[in-house]
Image (cartoon, grey):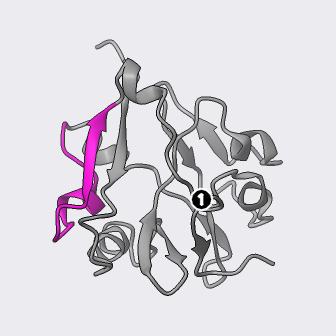
């Protein structure tokens, strides 16, 4: 079976997001109580989910001294929990601020777009449980690849403060 790159991303419609955090709950349930979705706050206006972008050239992968973060043949950036030493290099390297520090488990939480589901032609857990329909999992087209999307450090502040 030929492995081909998954050319999709999670899109958030700010007009539909009600800040219910059902996406975070679904993620935590799927990952043994460790949510891999960051929450961002836009002043006092809104709290919204921030997802890993699975960048073409991910800075987090370059910054990881133990090679715990890798980009696979499908285009997903994922973390090996056994190799992660919790140094937080990836947290500081991520240009979108969407990798969080999970102090309880001494590893860094990171969204993998629910690769187990996506490879079986399902949508990520957060998208599947979004009560307001604000999250969608859409194909990246030539036109949409040129569009600028807001990120954690551009328009919002992460609820978890960095060290």
Q: Please give the name of the residue rendered at 35% of the width and 48% of the height, measured from the top-left corner.
A: 10
42, above or below 15, in the image: below
Picture coordinates of residue 52, whole percent (x, y): 51, 52
Quarter holding residue 131 = bottom left
Viewport quadrant of the C terminus? bottom right
In the picture shown, does residue 143 fall above or below 113? Answer: above
Choose between 58 and 116: the one closer to the eye: 58
Q: Is residue 76 above or below residue 11?
A: above
In the picture of the structure, the residue carrying the numbered disc 1 is 81
State which region is magenta: 121-139
Disc 1 secondary structure class = loop
Q: Position of residue 6 (x, y in %)?
A: 36, 28
| In the image, residue 61 lies in the stretch drawn in magenta | no
Left or right, residue 27 beside residue 97? left
From the top left corner, tell me how far across and down residue 55 is, in percent.
58, 37
Asked if residue 42 is positioned above or below residue 135 in the image, the reply reads below
Q: Which residue appears at 77% of the width and 48% of the height? A: 64
Is 135 part of what is drawn in magenta?
yes
> Around disc 1, counting alpha carbons within 10 Å, would you say few (fewer than 14), some (14 to 19), or many (20 or more)?
some
């Amino acid at each position: 079976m030929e492995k081909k790159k998954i050319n999709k991303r999670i899109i958030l419609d700010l007009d539909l997001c009600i800040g219910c955090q059902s996406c975070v709950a679904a993620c935590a349930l799927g990952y043994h109580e460790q949510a891999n979705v960051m929450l961002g706050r836009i002043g006092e206006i809104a709290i919204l989910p921030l997802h890993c972008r699975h960048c073409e050239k991910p800075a987090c992968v370059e910054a990881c001294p133990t090679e715990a973060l890798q980009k696979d043949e499908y285009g997903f950036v994922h973390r090996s929990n056994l190799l992660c030493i919790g140094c937080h290099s990836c947290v500081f390297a991520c240009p979108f601020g969407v990798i969080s520090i999970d102090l309880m488990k001494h590893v860094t939480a990171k969204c993998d777009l629910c690769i187990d589901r996506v490879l079986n032609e399902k949508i990520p857990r957060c998208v599947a449980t979004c009560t307001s329909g604000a999250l969608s999992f859409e194909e990246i087209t030539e036109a949409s690849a040129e569009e600028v999307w807001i990120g954690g450090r551009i328009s919002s502040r992460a609820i978890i403060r960095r060290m």
